[in-house]
Image (cartoon, rainbow, N blue to C red):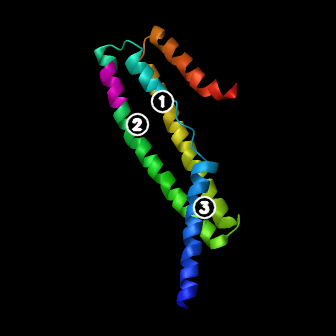
């Protein structure tokens, strides 16, 4: 293999990797979880008692670790997608498989985020839960209007 051909191949692989990252981040973005706003609501606007606050912090720590693991998996899926794009230069079986894997990972993160939201809700009294529920509905429907 000549140096020129090697450089050209490296350039194509690099551009495919960039395209894969672009596709993964911009065309298939994970929805921003409503939990950030909900955490702010819980901490700033709902009067949590000390036990609720302690339990909420414990839930947040567990979820933060889980979320980081899922986000790392999504980054790995983006690398796989970039490699598939570099190998196929079309929507072929490797690209399709990488996209499907990425969607599965994003779906799992969304399910885990919702499980976390419901776990937080279980800590609340009925009056607190009503405000929490209203914030969830607002967060999920705001862009639909």
Tell me, yes or no, whether the two marked residues, 1 and 3, touch with CB atoms within 8 Å.
no
Q: Main secondary structure of the magenta part?
A: helix
Where disc 3 sits, the SS reads helix
Residue furthest toward the bottom? 2
45, above or below 104, in the image: above
**Viewer-closest of 86 and 70:** 86
Quote the CA–CA distance across marks 1 and 3: 30 Å
Residue furthest toward the front? 4
Which residue is at 41% across, 42% downward?
A: 66
Query: Is residue 58 magenta-colored?
Result: yes
- The residue singled out by tag 2 in the image is 63
Dot 2, how many residues are within 10 Å of its Cα: few (below 14), some (14-19), or many (20+)?
A: some
- The residue singled out by tag 1 in the image is 35
- The answer to whether residue 31 is left or right of residue 66 is right
Q: Which residues are magenta?
A: 53-59
Where disc 2 sits, the SS reads helix
74, above or below 44, in the image: below
Which residue is at 47% across, 48% downward?
A: 71
- The residue singled out by tag 3 in the image is 19
Tell me, yes or no, whether the two marked residues, 1 and 2, touch with CB atoms within 8 Å.
yes
31, above or below 20, in the image: above
* Percent of width and height locating residue 141: 64, 25
Residue 32's image quarter? top right
* Percent of width and height locating residue 57: 33, 28
In the picture, the quarter occupied by the C terminus is: top right
**Viewer-closest of 136 and 25:** 25
Quote the CA–CA distance across marks 1 and 2: 10 Å
């Amino acid at each position: 293999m000549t140096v020129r051909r090697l450089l050209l191949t490296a350039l194509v692989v690099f551009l495919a990797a960039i395209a894969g990252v672009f596709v993964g981040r911009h065309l298939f973005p994970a929805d921003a979880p409503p939990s950030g706003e909900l955490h702010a609501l819980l901490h700033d606007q709902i009067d949590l008692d000390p036990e609720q606050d302690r339990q909420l912090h414990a839930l947040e720590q567990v979820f933060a670790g889980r979320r980081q693991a899922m986000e790392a998996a999504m980054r790995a899926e983006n690398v796989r997608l970039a490699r598939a794009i570099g190998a196929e230069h079309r929507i072929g079986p490797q690209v399709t498989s990488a996209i499907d894997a990425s969607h599965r990972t994003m779906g799992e993160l969304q399910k885990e985020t919702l499980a976390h939201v419901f776990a937080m809700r279980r800590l609340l009294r009925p009056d607190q839960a009503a405000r929490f529920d209203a914030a969830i509905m607002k967060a999920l429907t705001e862009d639909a209007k």
